[in-house]
Image: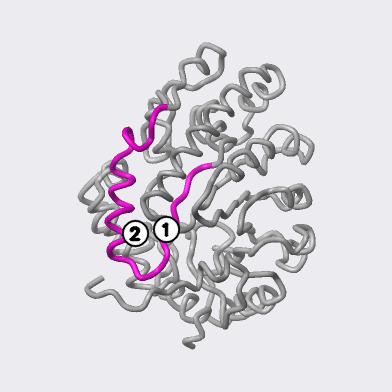
């Protein structure tokens, strides 16, 4: 940005459960392929190079703030980036591929936790560059331990997640060793993001929704609690996709915000969560492929219901899809901001 204006702290106020005139708005995956400006940068470098080049990662992080006028920026990176220092051989083709999946005690023993500050300097340099330029809060993020475990055990994405489920139940000691190391590494990774200037961090548990409530409660939630309890100095948002069946259990978590996908009503989520959290969400990203009256109808319903929660951050229920029309995204942001 050419010149800093007054700092927009709406996101921080919402997470502190202050009463504000409108919900702040940002969008998961707001920096991405639906924007021509992003595609122009991406055409010059690989995805991995983009993540590891602070000046370019800073540039694409700023694009939606400048073009759409969102109330927050989210660090451009990938949830799998911090796995490399742990000894994971990772590539994107374009989907992520783990070339040395972790499925035995020997594999788990070989994982290292390391020092993210030394081993991921480009992430923290990107954050420092952004903090100097932004007049909105910067959101850092990570994958949750279980979601990261899914990737490194399966070897990439999966349709049935059979390998991680087999490991959880047949080799619980190996599963717990993996989760312990991932939780420790993620804690250090996020705490260093906070140290370098992120005022909010979001923990993405993309794959935790594959589990039964009993499995989640016993084998995932304790690790999430350990992680959220350990983070200091910033607001924490936890987002578990397809996780509405767990909400009654999530009331034990020490965080400011809870992300919602589009499969649960905000009022119902608030009730299940005990009225404890600022709620974030939860428009279906597919609605951005419809017309403006449809977007307006669904968005206004979410905004109205969000007023009854302790706090509300307008967002999507998952990330923007690559083919999404930019004009509809801009319309949505302007609508939430009361500019239409």
Q: Quadrant of residue 49?
A: top left
Q: Is residue 166 magenta?
A: no
Give how far apart the Cα atoms at labels 1 and 2 are. Answer: 7 Å
Contact (Cβ within 8 Å) of mark 1 with mark 2 = yes
Query: 42 above or below 178?
Result: below
Which residues fall within the magenta stretch? 114-143
What residue would you read off at disc 1? 74
- Residue name at image x 58 percent, y 27 percent: 180
Give SS at disc 1.
strand
- Residue name at image x 37 percent, y 69 percent: 65
Q: Position of residue 159 (x, y in %)?
A: 60, 36
**Left or right placement of residue 86 versus residue 130 in this view:** right
Q: Position of residue 178 (x, y in %)?
A: 56, 24
Give SS at disc 2.
helix
Q: Position of residue 240 (x, y in %)?
A: 63, 49
What residue would you read off at disc 2? 61
Q: Quadrant of residue 309?
A: bottom right
Q: Position of residue 37 (x, y in %)?
A: 28, 63
């Amino acid at each position: 940005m050419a010149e800093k204006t007054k700092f927009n702290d709406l996101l921080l106020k919402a997470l502190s459960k202050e009463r504000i005139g409108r919900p702040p708005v940002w969008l998961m995956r707001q920096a991405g392929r639906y924007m021509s400006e992003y595609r122009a940068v991406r055409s010059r470098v690989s995805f991995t190079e983009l993540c590891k080049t602070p000046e370019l990662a800073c540039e694409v992080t700023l694009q939606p703030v400048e073009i759409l006028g969102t109330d927050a920026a989210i660090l451009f990176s990938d949830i799998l980036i911090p796995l490399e220092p742990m000894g994971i051989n990772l590539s994107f083709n374009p989907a992520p591929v783990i070339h040395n999946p972790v499925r035995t005690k020997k594999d788990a023993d070989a994982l290292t936790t390391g020092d993210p500050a030394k081993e991921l300097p480009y992430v923290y340099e990107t954050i420092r560059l952004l903090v100097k330029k932004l007049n909105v809060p910067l959101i850092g993020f990570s994958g949750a331990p279980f979601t990261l475990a899914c990737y490194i055990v399966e070897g990439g994405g999966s349709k049935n997640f059979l390998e991680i489920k087999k490991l959880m139940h047949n080799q619980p000691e190996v599963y717990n060793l993996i989760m312990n190391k991932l939780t420790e590494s993620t804690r250090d990774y996020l705490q260093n993001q906070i140290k370098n200037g992120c005022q909010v961090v979001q923990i993405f548990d993309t794959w935790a929704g594959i589990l039964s409530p009993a499995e989640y409660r016993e084998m995932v939630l304790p690790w999430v609690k350990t992680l959220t309890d350990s983070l200091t100095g910033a607001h924490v948002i936890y987002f578990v996709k397809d996780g509405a069946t767990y909400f009654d259990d999530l009331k034990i978590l020490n965080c400011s915000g809870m992300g919602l996908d589009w499969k649960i009503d905000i009022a119902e989520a608030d009730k299940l969560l005990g009225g404890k959290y600022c709620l974030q969400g939860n428009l279906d990203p597919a609605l951005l492929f419809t017309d403006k009256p449809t977007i307006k109808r669904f968005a206004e319903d979410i905004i109205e219901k969000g007023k009854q929660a302790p706090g509300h951050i307008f967002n999507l229920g998952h990330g923007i899809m690559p083919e999404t029309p930019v004009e509809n995204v801009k319309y949505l942001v302007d609508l939430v901001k009361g500019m239409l």
